[in-house]
Image (spheres, rainbow, N blue to C red):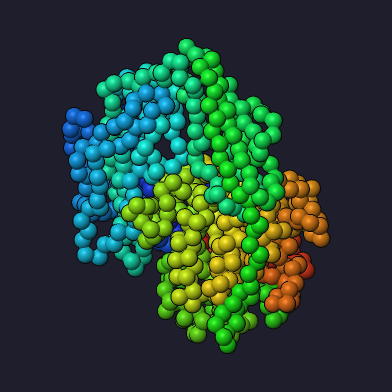
């Protein structure tokens, strides 16, 4: 996924519709869901896409029709999922019928069990799922079950999201009934989704969903009168030992009986004075020293007082670990400049299944390619037979996303999968239903995923790793977890050191507000759209506030430009660290070479300002799909 610092590329409306079943910048097709009536209780839907085969012009409509069947308590209704895909996209997955892949199979009958009362605990019961039977040539990439709780004024109408619904749908089998749910029926939608690869040659895949719903006949009862009000922490907590020196905490609205009065809620940190809880029920600790810490939340009304507490320890972050390989081998450190004295040329092709070689005047020294889809043999070919610009042969960077993508073969959340805890998967990533943010605070739970993915890059022979979406704390509300820059530093310090432990170098990605810190752990950087947003160099951002710091000049304590990398001269990189910079056609800002446009948008002006300075970057204009079809590198566009 290619998304700069919490922003989306601003596409025109027509282009945005085309991308609904096309590639994201990382090459993944967002899901399309079945359109069902307002009274639908359940349904089957499908979405499909082809990795690296979508084009930017010409569209046709692909229609996928869902099955229908009926029942009283758990009705299944279908609909039609419709989206446009480029005309020259391979139609394999987009035009196939649902009959080609069996839908997820449900066993039993869904029920809601537990205490149907404000503050009571209820849970899904009675239903289990398994993937549908696959045909030869099909491969199950992931399988997940999500839970969506609703509160309905009438049993089959007037439904809204349940009051205390959390940000983690795959972990929501259990639900604590909210105060605002009182007097309403609870409805649970349980949805199973299978992501099936239908053609490995072009990574075509389908997403098939089947849903079942159940609505309680009884309504939620009020909190018991005279009982002390209560609340609970929600949407995750830091681990009991963390290197993060700052945290956010979130609590649910209080559970109480109206006859006892609306509760007042206050919080305190480390035994300091009690403070009123903010209206959004999220509070910040501020910067913390190393050592033990404790937060408390007090909830009070005429019935009495309860206090929720949480304690943890802040420990020092691990020191940066150097890259090490077996005896007789050395790590490759991407240099700022090539042997001709210019920023080292690169190409970014994470929207392709098979890498495309650049030859002649277009040859490059670095290829950044998808870590899952690129094979060991293809990496070896790049290293041994491909033409480079100034090296003997190019180097290969392994692209890995730190957000969750359901089309990856390790994506099934626990308990079915081994690598992604269900409680660590949060909000949908900028409107792409197949991608979700990950709770970086759960480092110990996520270490197996990091280890397996990074070791995969090493086994395939990559020279370096690009870790994407490292900025899930910007802004804090993006993910549903209210992460802090400190949470990011705690997670990334481990991840970067792990890459070095496997004998590869590692690249920083976007995130200017922490570049001054990231340069200590990483060996270069990739940045998107810094020219269009006027962010490339420390001098351009000096004085701005980001991620809890004020951006300084390049030689200050907290510079925010990516020239902090090119200016960082070390024993392994004596001429500075490499930075690759990408601008996109879809931004309609940097013009293509030879195109007449306002001076500041001319390709030559872009290169003069970003590529040519002493601390400049390897700047390229790409198409957002990063599929190799557009490649205009500075200084001339070839």
Residue beneath the point at 66% across and 64% down: 319
Q: Is residue 508 left or right of residue 228?
A: right
Of residue 295 and residue 18, the one placed in the foreground of this image is 295
With respect to residue 237, does 281 lie above or below?
above
Residue beneath the point at 38% across and 52% down: 413
Tell me if I can see residue 638 in this picture.
no
**Relative image position of residue 258 (x, y in whole percent):** 47, 14
Of residue 104 and residue 81, the one placed in the foreground of this image is 104
Which of the 4 image quadrants contains residue 264?
Answer: top right
**Relative image position of residue 300 (x, y in whole percent):** 56, 21
Q: Is residue 272 left or right of residue 103?
A: right
**Relative image position of residue 540 (x, y in whole percent):** 76, 53
Which of the 4 image quadrants contains residue 501?
Answer: bottom right
Residue beneath the point at 22% across and 33% down: 75
With respect to residue 345, does 303 lie above or below?
above
Tell me if I can see residue 111 in this picture.
yes
**Relative image position of residue 456 (x, y in whole percent):** 45, 70
Residue beneath the point at 30% across and 45% down: 192
Query: How many numbered discs?
Result: 0
């Amino acid at each position: 996924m290619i998304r700069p610092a919490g922003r989306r590329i601003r596409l025109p409306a027509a282009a945005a519709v085309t991308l609904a079943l096309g590639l994201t910048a990382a090459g993944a097709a967002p899901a399309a869901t079945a359109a069902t009536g307002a009274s639908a209780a359940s349904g089957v839907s499908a979405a499909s896409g082809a990795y690296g085969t979508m084009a930017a012009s010409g569209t046709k409509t692909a229609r996928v029709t869902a099955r229908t069947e009926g029942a009283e308590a758990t009705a299944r209704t279908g609909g039609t999922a419709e989206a446009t895909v480029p005309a020259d996209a391979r139609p394999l997955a987009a035009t196939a019928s649902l009959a080609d892949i069996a839908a997820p199979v449900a066993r039993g009958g869904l029920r809601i069990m537990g205490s149907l009362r404000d503050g009571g605990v209820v849970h899904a019961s009675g239903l289990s799922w398994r993937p549908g039977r696959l045909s030869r040539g099909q491969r199950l990439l992931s399988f997940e079950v999500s839970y969506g709780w609703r509160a309905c004024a009438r049993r089959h109408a007037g439904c809204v999201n349940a009051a205390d619904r959390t940000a983690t749908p795959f972990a929501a089998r259990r639900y604590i009934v909210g105060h605002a749910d009182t007097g309403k029926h609870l409805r649970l939608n349980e949805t199973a989704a299978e992501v099936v690869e239908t053609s490995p040659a072009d990574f075509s895949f389908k997403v098939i969903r089947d849903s079942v719903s159940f609505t309680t006949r009884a309504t939620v009862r009020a909190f018991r009168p005279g009982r002390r009000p209560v609340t609970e922490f929600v949407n995750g907590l830091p681990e009991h030992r963390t290197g993060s020196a700052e945290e956010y905490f979130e609590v649910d609205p209080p559970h109480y009986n109206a006859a006892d009065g609306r509760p007042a809620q206050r919080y305190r940190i480390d035994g300091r004075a009690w403070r009123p809880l903010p209206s959004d029920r999220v509070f910040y600790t501020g910067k913390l020293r190393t050592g033990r810490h404790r937060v408390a939340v007090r909830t009070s009304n005429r019935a009495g007082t309860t206090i929720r507490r949480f304690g943890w320890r802040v420990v020092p972050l691990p020191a940066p670990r150097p890259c090490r390989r077996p005896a007789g081998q050395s790590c490759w450190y991407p240099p700022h400049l090539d042997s001709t004295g210019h920023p080292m040329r690169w190409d970014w092709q994470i929207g392709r299944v098979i890498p495309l070689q650049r030859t002649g005047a277009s040859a490059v020294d670095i290829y950044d390619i998808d870590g899952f889809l690129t094979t060991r043999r293809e990496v070896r070919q790049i290293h041994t037979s491909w033409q480079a610009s100034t090296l003997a042969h190019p180097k290969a960077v392994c692209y890995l996303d730190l957000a969750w993508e359901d089309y990856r073969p390790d994506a099934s959340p626990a308990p079915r999968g081994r690598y992604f805890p269900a409680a660590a998967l949060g909000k949908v990533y900028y409107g792409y239903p197949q991608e979700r943010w990950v709770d970086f605070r759960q480092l110990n739970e996520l270490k197996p995923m990091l280890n397996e993915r990074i070791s995969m890059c090493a086994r395939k022979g990559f020279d370096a790793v690009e870790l994407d979406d490292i900025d899930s704390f910007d802004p804090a509300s993006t993910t549903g977890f209210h992460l802090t820059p400190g949470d990011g530093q705690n997670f990334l310090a481990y991840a970067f050191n792990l890459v070095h432990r496997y004998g590869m170098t590692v690249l920083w990605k976007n995130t200017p507000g922490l570049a001054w810190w990231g340069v200590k752990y990483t060996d270069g950087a990739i940045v998107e759209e810094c020219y269009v947003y006027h962010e490339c160099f420390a001098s351009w951002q000096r004085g701005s506030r980001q991620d809890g710091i004020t951006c300084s000049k390049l030689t200050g304590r907290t510079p925010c430009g990516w020239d902090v990398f090119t200016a960082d001269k070390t024993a392994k990189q004596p001429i500075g660290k490499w930075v690759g910079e990408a601008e996109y056609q879809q931004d309609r800002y940097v013009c293509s070479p030879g195109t007449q446009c306002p001076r500041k948008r001319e390709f030559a002006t872009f290169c003069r300002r970003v590529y040519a300075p002493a601390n400049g970057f390897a700047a390229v204009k790409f198409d957002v799909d990063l599929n190799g079809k557009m490649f205009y590198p500075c200084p001339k566009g070839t």
